Image: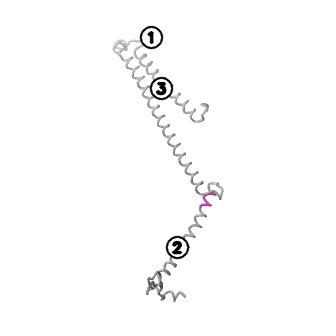
Amino acid sequence: QLSEQRTEVRQIDGQQHYNKIDHLTGRTPMEKFSLRSQQVVKEAVDSIAELKENYAKLLEYFGEDESMPSDAFFGTINKFVVSFETAAQEVEEAEKKRQKEKLRAAAKAAALSKKISTTNASPSNAPNKKSSKKTIGPGKRTNANVSNKGSEIAADAAATMRSQENCTESTKTDGTGTE
């Protein structure tokens, strides 16, 4: 019957149609299409079966029910990714803020130290050569003692700021402020 189709001329709506046979393959265009289509459809069916198998493995990996629709599963994954990116951004911003606070505290300590050292180094407090050579008894202050006191105050201020930062960090760590 197929050989009859190859040679038969048909009348469709008053137009003559006939199947052109490719002399190299001996097949009509429809036969070529049919053969190619069968192969493509077989590959598509195999691909779908592989996709279903891989999706089942994916659901098993994430501990989800095998009957879960793909749109629900991937919607959940998308929500997680968005939440994770938001949390990462918040952590990064908090870290930047903490660094800025640290720099501000260091700048305050440096300014306080500088202020104290400039106060102690003013001309009225500057030691002259004679007074630096004198021996002074206990309980009396020299200009060097005053300068050391200013440095001690600045160091105490810096230590206080560091301890406040450590308290803030431990509060962030466990949320209660206790270690």
Report crowding for label 1: few under 14, some 14 to 19, many 20 or more residues within 10 A (C-alpha): few
| Magenta-colored stretch includes residue 56 | yes
Mark 1 and mark 3: Cα distance apart in space: 27 Å
Helix, strand, or loop for circle 3? helix
Q: Position of residue 152 (x, y in %)?
A: 46, 21
Looking at the image, which is closer to me, 157 or 88?
A: 88
List the residue tagged with mark 3.
158
Looking at the image, which is closer to me, 39 or 174?
A: 39
Please give the name of the residue rendered at 49% of the width and 42% of the height, measured from the top-left corner: 89
Residue extent of the magenta highlight:
55-59
- Residue 140: mark: 1
List the residue tagged with mark 2.
40
Report crowding for label 2: few under 14, some 14 to 19, many 20 or more residues within 10 A (C-alpha): few
Please give the name of the residue rendered at 58% of the width and 36% of the height, measured from the top-left corner: 173
Please give the name of the residue rendered at 51% of the width and 43% of the height, measured from the top-left corner: 88
For marks 2 and 3, give the one nearer the viewer.
2
Helix, strand, or loop for circle 2? helix
